[in-house]
Image (cartoon, rainbow, N blue to C red):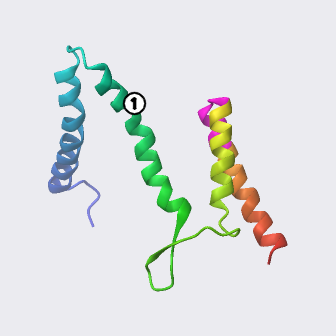
Amino acid sequence: MTDYLPFEHLLLILGMAVVTYIPRAVPLMALSTRELNPLFMRWLEMVPPAVLAALLGPELFLRASPDGAKELFLSPNNIFLPAALITFLMGWLSRNFFATIAVGMATVALLRYYMSTFLL
Protein backbone atom coordinates (compact mmCIF):
# COMPACT_ATOMS: atom_id res chain seq x y z
CA MET A 1 0.00 0.00 0.00
CA THR A 2 1.30 3.43 -0.87
CA ASP A 3 1.56 6.38 1.47
CA TYR A 4 0.12 8.92 -0.93
CA LEU A 5 -3.40 9.71 -2.06
CA PRO A 6 -4.12 8.19 -5.49
CA PHE A 7 -5.31 10.64 -8.13
CA GLU A 8 -8.65 8.84 -8.45
CA HIS A 9 -9.32 9.32 -4.73
CA LEU A 10 -8.48 13.01 -5.00
CA LEU A 11 -10.90 13.35 -7.92
CA LEU A 12 -13.56 11.52 -5.93
CA ILE A 13 -13.12 13.85 -2.93
CA LEU A 14 -13.21 16.94 -5.16
CA GLY A 15 -16.32 15.64 -6.92
CA MET A 16 -18.09 15.06 -3.61
CA ALA A 17 -17.13 18.57 -2.49
CA VAL A 18 -18.56 20.07 -5.69
CA VAL A 19 -21.86 18.18 -5.53
CA THR A 20 -22.19 19.15 -1.87
CA TYR A 21 -21.38 22.81 -2.46
CA ILE A 22 -23.52 23.46 -5.57
CA PRO A 23 -26.96 22.73 -4.02
CA ARG A 24 -26.10 25.13 -1.20
CA ALA A 25 -24.46 27.92 -3.17
CA VAL A 26 -26.83 28.19 -6.15
CA PRO A 27 -30.01 28.99 -4.17
CA LEU A 28 -28.05 31.33 -1.92
CA MET A 29 -26.71 33.28 -4.87
CA ALA A 30 -30.01 33.21 -6.77
CA LEU A 31 -32.20 34.31 -3.85
CA SER A 32 -29.87 36.65 -1.97
CA THR A 33 -30.98 39.75 -3.90
CA ARG A 34 -34.71 39.00 -3.91
CA GLU A 35 -37.45 39.75 -1.41
CA LEU A 36 -39.14 36.45 -0.62
CA ASN A 37 -42.82 35.96 0.09
CA PRO A 38 -43.50 36.01 3.87
CA LEU A 39 -45.58 32.84 3.55
CA PHE A 40 -42.62 31.09 1.89
CA MET A 41 -40.29 32.37 4.61
CA ARG A 42 -42.67 31.03 7.27
CA TRP A 43 -42.70 27.67 5.50
CA LEU A 44 -38.88 27.63 5.40
CA GLU A 45 -38.79 28.24 9.16
CA MET A 46 -40.75 25.02 9.68
CA VAL A 47 -38.39 22.81 7.66
CA PRO A 48 -35.74 22.19 10.41
CA PRO A 49 -38.29 21.10 13.08
CA ALA A 50 -40.03 18.88 10.53
CA VAL A 51 -36.76 17.22 9.51
CA LEU A 52 -35.77 16.76 13.16
CA ALA A 53 -39.14 15.16 13.94
CA ALA A 54 -38.83 12.87 10.91
CA LEU A 55 -35.39 11.73 12.07
CA LEU A 56 -36.25 11.32 15.75
CA GLY A 57 -39.73 9.81 15.48
CA PRO A 58 -38.72 6.34 14.27
CA GLU A 59 -35.83 6.18 16.75
CA LEU A 60 -38.11 7.05 19.68
CA PHE A 61 -41.20 5.01 18.85
CA LEU A 62 -40.00 2.00 16.83
CA ARG A 63 -37.65 -0.90 17.40
CA ALA A 64 -36.56 -3.82 15.26
CA SER A 65 -38.40 -7.05 15.97
CA PRO A 66 -36.52 -10.38 15.88
CA ASP A 67 -37.50 -10.89 12.23
CA GLY A 68 -36.09 -7.45 11.30
CA ALA A 69 -39.38 -5.62 10.87
CA LYS A 70 -40.06 -2.38 12.72
CA GLU A 71 -42.65 -2.47 15.50
CA LEU A 72 -44.13 0.13 17.80
CA PHE A 73 -42.24 0.28 21.11
CA LEU A 74 -44.31 2.11 23.73
CA SER A 75 -43.06 0.31 26.81
CA PRO A 76 -41.69 1.33 30.21
CA ASN A 77 -38.44 -0.26 29.01
CA ASN A 78 -38.10 2.36 26.25
CA ILE A 79 -35.76 4.75 28.06
CA PHE A 80 -35.58 7.11 25.10
CA LEU A 81 -39.16 8.36 25.49
CA PRO A 82 -38.75 9.88 28.98
CA ALA A 83 -35.26 11.08 28.04
CA ALA A 84 -36.66 12.83 24.97
CA LEU A 85 -39.42 14.46 27.00
CA ILE A 86 -36.99 15.73 29.64
CA THR A 87 -34.60 16.95 26.94
CA PHE A 88 -37.42 18.68 25.05
CA LEU A 89 -38.52 20.43 28.24
CA MET A 90 -34.97 21.54 28.97
CA GLY A 91 -34.56 22.92 25.46
CA TRP A 92 -37.90 24.69 25.56
CA LEU A 93 -37.29 26.28 28.95
CA SER A 94 -33.60 27.17 28.64
CA ARG A 95 -33.17 27.77 24.89
CA ASN A 96 -29.57 26.73 25.49
CA PHE A 97 -28.24 24.22 22.97
CA PHE A 98 -25.35 22.89 25.05
CA ALA A 99 -27.39 22.59 28.24
CA THR A 100 -30.08 20.70 26.33
CA ILE A 101 -27.56 18.26 24.86
CA ALA A 102 -25.93 17.75 28.27
CA VAL A 103 -29.28 17.10 29.96
CA GLY A 104 -30.27 14.65 27.21
CA MET A 105 -27.02 12.70 27.48
CA ALA A 106 -27.14 12.67 31.28
CA THR A 107 -30.77 11.53 31.27
CA VAL A 108 -30.05 8.61 28.93
CA ALA A 109 -26.98 7.65 30.99
CA LEU A 110 -28.92 7.77 34.26
CA LEU A 111 -31.85 5.82 32.84
CA ARG A 112 -29.51 3.17 31.42
CA TYR A 113 -27.77 2.90 34.78
CA TYR A 114 -31.09 2.70 36.63
CA MET A 115 -32.50 0.10 34.24
CA SER A 116 -29.40 -2.09 34.42
CA THR A 117 -28.88 -1.79 38.18
CA PHE A 118 -32.33 -1.91 39.66
CA LEU A 119 -34.43 -3.80 37.13
CA LEU A 120 -32.16 -6.71 36.21
Please indicate whether residue 63 sits to the left or right of residue 3 in the image.
right
Q: Is residue 29 above or below residue 87?
A: above
What residue is at 49 percent from the left and 54 percent from the top? 56
Q: Residue furthest right?
A: 118
What residue is at 15 percent from the left and 49 percent from the top? 11
Q: Is residue 76 magenta?
A: no
Please indicate whether residue 1 sits to the left or right of residue 103 in the image.
left
Where residue 89 appears, as percent x and y from the top left, is 67, 40
- The secondary structure making up most of the magenta span is helix
Q: Amino acid at mark 1?
A: Glu
Q: Is residue 1 above or below residue 56?
A: below
Where residue 77 appears, as percent x and y from the top left, is 69, 70
Q: Residue furthest front?
A: 39
Where residue 40 appears, as percent x and y from the top left, is 29, 27
Task: Choose between 107 and 48: the one closer to the eye.
Answer: 48
Please indicate whether residue 20 sits to the left or right of residue 60 in the image.
left
Q: Is residue 14 above or below residue 81?
A: above
What residue is at 45 percent from the left and 86 percent from the top? 67
Where residue 95 appears, as percent x and y from the top left, is 62, 29
Residue under label 1, please give it. Answer: 45
Q: Where, quadrant-wise, is the N terminus in this rendering?
A: bottom left
Task: Choose between 13 and 61: the one closer to the eye.
Answer: 61
Q: Where, quadrant-wise, is the C terminus in this rendering?
A: bottom right
Give the residues drawn in magenta, as a range: 94-102
Mark 1 neighbour density, 10 Å: few (under 14) some (14–19) many (20 or more): few
What residue is at 26 percent from the left and 54 percent from the top? 4
